Amino acid sequence: MPQLEKLSLHRIDLRIDDFQHIAYLHELLWLEITKSSRPPDGLAFLSSLEQLWLLRLHSMKLEDDDLRQVGSLHRLLRLDLSGNPIGNLGLAHLSRLKKVTSLVLVDTQISSDGIGHLVGMSDLRQLDLARTKLDDNAVDDLCQLHNLRELDLCGTNLTSEGVSKLRRELGRCLIWWPERTAPSAITAY
């Protein structure tokens, strides 16, 4: 009998027993849960999902300590934690994910101080840090991610000098960063 390999749940109010049922899907490769409530016992249900290679937990009000369980998913290749109030302590748990090639942390509370936790992710190719609290203090750590091919820094506090250094050091990496300009005045007619 075929096993379920992909599960996407969007805007569903999940209960604790729903998360326990997900834990029995041992062959699951792809799990997306977006705009749902945080499980009362955190992400413990993930411990039995050792085959996961894609995990997207978007806007679930996850906390830093919840990422301890995510850090144990050693087959994970793609991870999206956007829209969660996680910070630098949460990134420390993710540093164990050596095979991750894509990491999306849009609209999180991470700052430049936490980027050093990502340096060991040598397979990282795509990193989305849009609308985070990064500034030029993150540049030296980001420059150590030599395999990056795409880096989104839109909505951060990096300066043109910091982004220029990144572009020099990560030559083959496409860096998304619009230089900030003052908004143009709206003319009433």
Image (tube, helix red, strand yellow):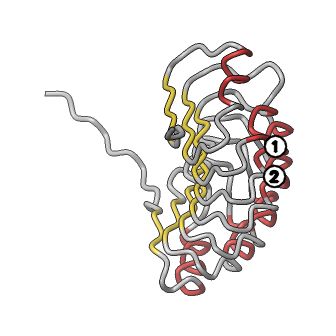
Label 2, secondary structure: give it.
Answer: loop
Label 1, secondary structure: give it.
Answer: helix
* Relative image position of residue 180 (x, y in whole percent): 46, 56
Residue occupying the point 80% across, 19% down = 40
Tell me how far mark 1 sits from mark 2, CA to CA.
5 Å
- Asked if labels 2 and 1 touch by Cβ distance under 8 angstroms, the answer is yes
State the residue position of label 2: 72
The total of numbered circles placed on residues is: 2
Image-based side of 83 in relation to 73, left or right = left
Q: Is residue 84 above or below residue 19?
A: below
Residue occupying the point 79% across, 41% down = 47
State the residue position of label 1: 69
Q: Is residue 30 above or below residue 174?
A: above
Residue 119: image quadrant is bottom right
* Relative image position of residue 50 (x, y in whole percent): 72, 49
Q: Is residue 32 above or below residue 136?
A: above
In the picture as drawn, the residue positioned furthest to the front comes out as 1
Q: Around disc 2, counting alpha carbons within 10 Å, would you say few (fewer than 14), some (14 to 19), or many (20 or more)?
A: some
- Which amino acid, by three-letter code, is at mark 2? Ser
In the picture as drawn, the residue positioned furthest to the left comes out as 189
Residue occupying the point 57% across, 61% down = 102
Quadrant of the snapshot with the C terminus: top left
Q: Which disc, if any, is residue 161?
A: none
Residue 115: image quadrant is bottom right
- Which amino acid, by three-letter code, is at mark 1? Gln
Residue occupying the point 60% across, 30% down = 59
Image-based side of 43 in relation to 176, left or right = right
* Relative image position of residue 4 (x, y in whole percent): 52, 38
51 and 92: which one is in front?
51
Image-based side of 142 in relation to 163, left or right = right
